[in-house]
Image (cartoon, rainbow, N blue to C red):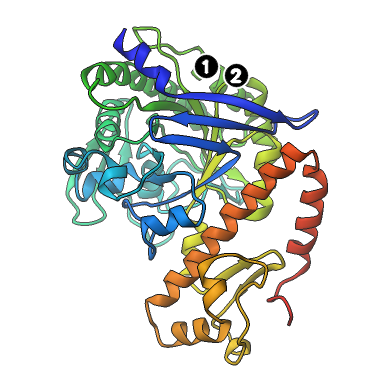
Amino acid sequence: MACVSAASEFSFKVGTRLEGRHGRTGVISTPHGDIATPAFIPVGTKATVKAVLPETMKELGSQALLANAYHLYLQPGPDIVDEAGGVAEFMNWHGPTFTDSGGFQVMSLGVGFKKVLAMESVGVQNDDVIAKGKERLAHVDDDGVTFRSHLDGSEHRFTPEVSMGIQHRLGADVMMAFDELTTLMNTRGYQEESLERTRLWAQRCLDEHERLTAARSHRPYQALFGVIQGAQYEDLRRKACRDLEDLRGAAGTGFDGYGIGGALEKHNLGTIVGWCCDELPEGKPRHLLGISEPEDIFTAVENGVDTFDCVNPSRVARNAALYTDEGRFNINTARFKRDFTPVDETCDCYTCANYTRAYIHHLFKAKEMLASTLCTIHNERFTVRLVDRVRESIDGGYFDDYQNEFLGRWRGRIKAPGL
C-alpha cells in the first residue's frame, strides 16, 4: 500500500482544451513543484545544461530539467547522486526533474545515428543498418542490452530492472520506462518484434518500480511514464498505447503518464502524436521525447503533447546559431562584426539586455567560452518564452491566430532581423 499512497504526490489536472483537438493546458504536480503545461523541459544531460548555471535556468523560466540516466550511470554513478540526495540536490536545481531510461542509447550506440527523434527514411529497410564510419556498441536481446561505454570501452548491461534501479537512485520526479528505440530503416517485422519486447520490458519496469518505491519510502515519490514506440505505423502506435494503458504492476499500479518516443519523419509528427493521443487517457500527461524547433512545438502541442524536451537550443547555441521570432541566424558571420544591437530587441533575457551582436561575434571568433554561455542563455529563454506564449494563447482562446502569426514570421525570414 505504500506504493499506492505515495503516488498521490504526483498528479495532473487538465485546464483549457483546444476545441476539436487534443491540445490542452494543464498542471503537473510533483513533490518538487508544479509544472504549468504545455512546457518545454530543457536537457541537462550530465546534470547540467551545458555552459550555464542551474540557477540561470531558473531565472530563464525553466520549470523542470531532464537528465540522462545512461550518462549519469557512467559518470559519476547513480550511487553518488543518490548519496547527494538525488539529481536536483546534486546540481542545486530547486524544481522538478525528469530522467530518460537509457533507451535512446540502445539506438544511438547500436547504429550511430544523430541524436534526434525526427529522421528521414531513404526507402531502404535493413535491420543491420549502422551509420557510416560508426562501430556498433550496443546489442539488444529479449532480456536487455549489452553495451560498451563510449568513455572507456568497458562492458555494461542494462535491463528494465537495472534502468529502474538507476533512475530511482537518480531521484527524478518523472522517470521513463526502459524501451528499445528503433530507426525508420528497420523492417516492419522488426518493428513488431521490438514493440512486443518494449511492452514486456514496460511490465518489468512497473513491477520493479513498485518494489523500489516501497523500499525507498524515505524518498519522495517518482512518477513512471511508459514509452510508446511503433515508428511510422499507425496500427503499431495505437497498439502500443493501448498495451501500455492496460499494464499494471502486482499492487495494481499503472503508468503515471506516457512518453511518445521512437523514430518518426518530421512531416508526420502531428499525425503520429494524434494517433497516440486518440488512444491515451485524458487524465494523464504526455511527454514527447526530443523536439524543440518552433514549428514542431506548435504541431506537438496542437495534437496533445503536454511536455517535451530537446538538446537543440543549447546545442545550436554552441555552434553560433541564435533564435528570434523572425528566424534563426548564425552570429559568427562577417555581417555582425560591427552590429552593436542586441541579438533580439524584443527578448528579455540577460544576453539581450547586456550584450551586442558584435561582442558575441567577437567571442566566437576569439574562441571564448563565454560565447556559448551567452548564446545558450538566449536560446533557452527564447524556447521557454515561446512555449509560455503558446500556453497563454490556448488559455486565451487565440492559439490559431498566434500560431499563424508566429510561423508566418519564422518561416518568412532566413537572416537576422533588420538586415
- The x, y position of residue 124, in whole percent, is 58, 47
Task: State the residue position of label 2.
Answer: 281
Q: Residue at x 50, y 81 (%)?
A: 360
Q: Residue at x 44, y 15 (%)?
A: 254
Which quarter of the rendered picture does the N terminus lie within?
A: top left
In the displayed structure, does residue 13 sit left or right of residue 396? left
In the displayed structure, does residue 206 sit left or right of residue 403? left
Callout 1 environment at 10 Å: few (<14), some (14 to 19), or many (20+)?
some
Residue 9 visible in rendering: yes
Q: Is residue 165 above or below residue 113?
A: above
Callout 2 environment at 10 Å: few (<14), some (14 to 19), or many (20+)?
some
Residue 18 is drawn in which quadrant?
A: top right
Q: Amino acid at mark 1?
A: Glu
Which disc, if any, is residue 125? Answer: none
- The x, y position of residue 47, in whole percent, is 32, 51
Residue 228 visible in rendering: no
Which disc, if any, is residue 245? Answer: 1
Q: Earlier in the sequence, mark 1 or mark 2?
A: 1
Which residue occupies the extreme bottom position in the image? 338
Mark 1 element type: helix
- The x, y position of residue 413, in whole percent, is 75, 70
Residue 70 is drawn in which quadrant?
A: top left
Q: Residue at x 34, y 7 (%)?
A: 250
Of 265 and 123, which appears nearest the observer? Answer: 265
Label 1 – label 2 distance at C-alpha: 8 Å
1 or 2: mark nearer the eye: 2
Mark 2 element type: loop
User: Mark 1 and 2 residues: CB-CB less than 8 Å, in contact?
Assistant: yes
Q: Amino acid at mark 2?
A: Pro
Which quarter of the rendered picture does the C terminus lie within?
A: bottom right
Q: Is residue 49 above or below residue 208?
A: below
Of 314 and 16, which appears nearest the observer? Answer: 16
